[in-house]
Structures are given as structure tokens and as C-alpha cells.
Amino acid sequence: MNIFVLLYNSGTDKEGIHSIELKGRTIVLMFEDKDDAIRYCGLLEAQDFPLPTVEKIDIDEIKDFCIKLGYECKLVEKNFVPKTAEDRLLISPPQKNLEVDNWEGESNNKENIDINTIKENLEKLL
């Protein structure tokens, strides 16, 4: 099954995937519907966040990527209706964003992850 994810600096050495931090967990959003992903990008841009690109990727590749890095992934189904405050984050970004400048310098995992490994894993997704 193909899904849509949000990538920053797609195809560059500084490529990254959009995620949200929730109670100490890193969650990668996967959108079933491309229009939902595009709408989420617009909401990010409205908050002065860098504009990601919407990329179509096989769901199993994203799941493997998340498992390797200790991330969680959440599928935002078409016509998703939130039932909790946490669910609302799947259709509308949080008000506060992490600083983009520190992506390479910060690690939320307890393990030390090699940046080259992350880059290789992202390249496999494309």
C-alpha cells in the first residue's frame, strides 16, 4: 500500500521527514490521501514552518524506517475524524515547532545514531 509522507530538503544531504513529538515519542505521520497531506503542509506553512514536499512511498518502507530509528508511525486515514486531543495533532500541527537548525545535532534516541545511516535509510525510501 502506498501512503504519503512529508519530506524536507528532498533529494539533498539534509533530507528529513516530518514528525511530531508527543509525550517523549517521535511520531511520523503517514497520510492515506494526498489531499490531506497537502492540506497539512499548508497548515505547517501558515505557522512559518519550512514547507515540506509530499512524497508517495510504500507503507512498509516507512514502517521499517521507523522501527530502525525507534520512531512510531501513525496512519491518517482518508476522512479521518479526531476523537481525542492527541488525534487532533494528526490533522493539525501543534502550535509550537522544534527548531529546524538543530535537526542534525539533536538525537531523541538513547542510542547514538550515525547520520550516514539515517541518510542511507531515507535514500532507500526514494
Image (cartoon, rainbow, N blue to C red):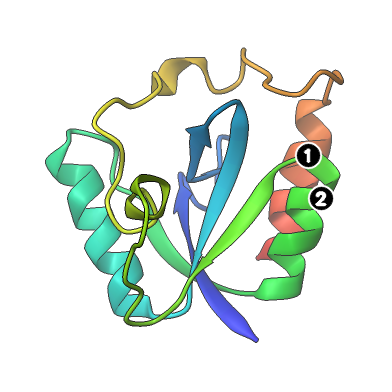
Q: In the figure, 105 relative to 12: above or below?
A: above
Q: Secondary structure at mark 1?
A: loop
Decide if residue 51 is on the left or right side of residue 71.
Answer: left
The residue wearing badge 1 is 70
The residue wearing badge 2 is 67
Query: What's the residue at 37%, 78% (across, down)?
Result: 34
Identify which residue, 99 or 53, lies in the foreground.
99
Residue 88, x across and y down, in percent: 32, 53
Residue 91, x across and y down, in percent: 31, 59
Mark 1 to mark 2: distance in Å?
5 Å
**In the picture, which quadrant includes the N terminus?**
bottom right
Q: Secondary structure at mark 2?
A: helix
Residue 13 seen: no
Identify which residue, 19 or 115, lies in the foreground.
19
Decide if residue 65 is on the left or right side of residue 95.
Answer: right
Query: What's the residue at 85%, 46% (across, down)?
Result: 68
Are dots 1 and 2 in contact, CB under 8 Å?
yes
Decide if residue 5 is on the left or right side of residue 82.
Answer: right
Residue type of the residue flagged with mark 2: Ile
Residue 107, x across and y down, in percent: 68, 19
Which residue ends up furthest to the front in the rendered image?
83
Residue 50: quarter of image: top left
Q: Using a 10 Å C-alpha cutoff, classify the residue at mark 1 as few (fewer than 14 neighbours), some (14 to 19) or many (20 or more).
A: some
Query: What's the residue at 36%, 48% (across, down)?
Result: 89
**In the picture, which quadrant includes the C terminus?**
bottom right
Q: Using a 10 Å C-alpha cutoff, classify the residue at mark 2 as few (fewer than 14 neighbours), some (14 to 19) or many (20 or more).
A: few
Which residue ends up furthest to the left in the rendered image?
46
Residue 14: quarter of image: top right
Q: In the figure, 64 relative to 97: above or below?
A: below
Residue type of the residue flagged with mark 1: Gly
Decide if residue 43 is on the left or right side of residue 21.
Answer: left
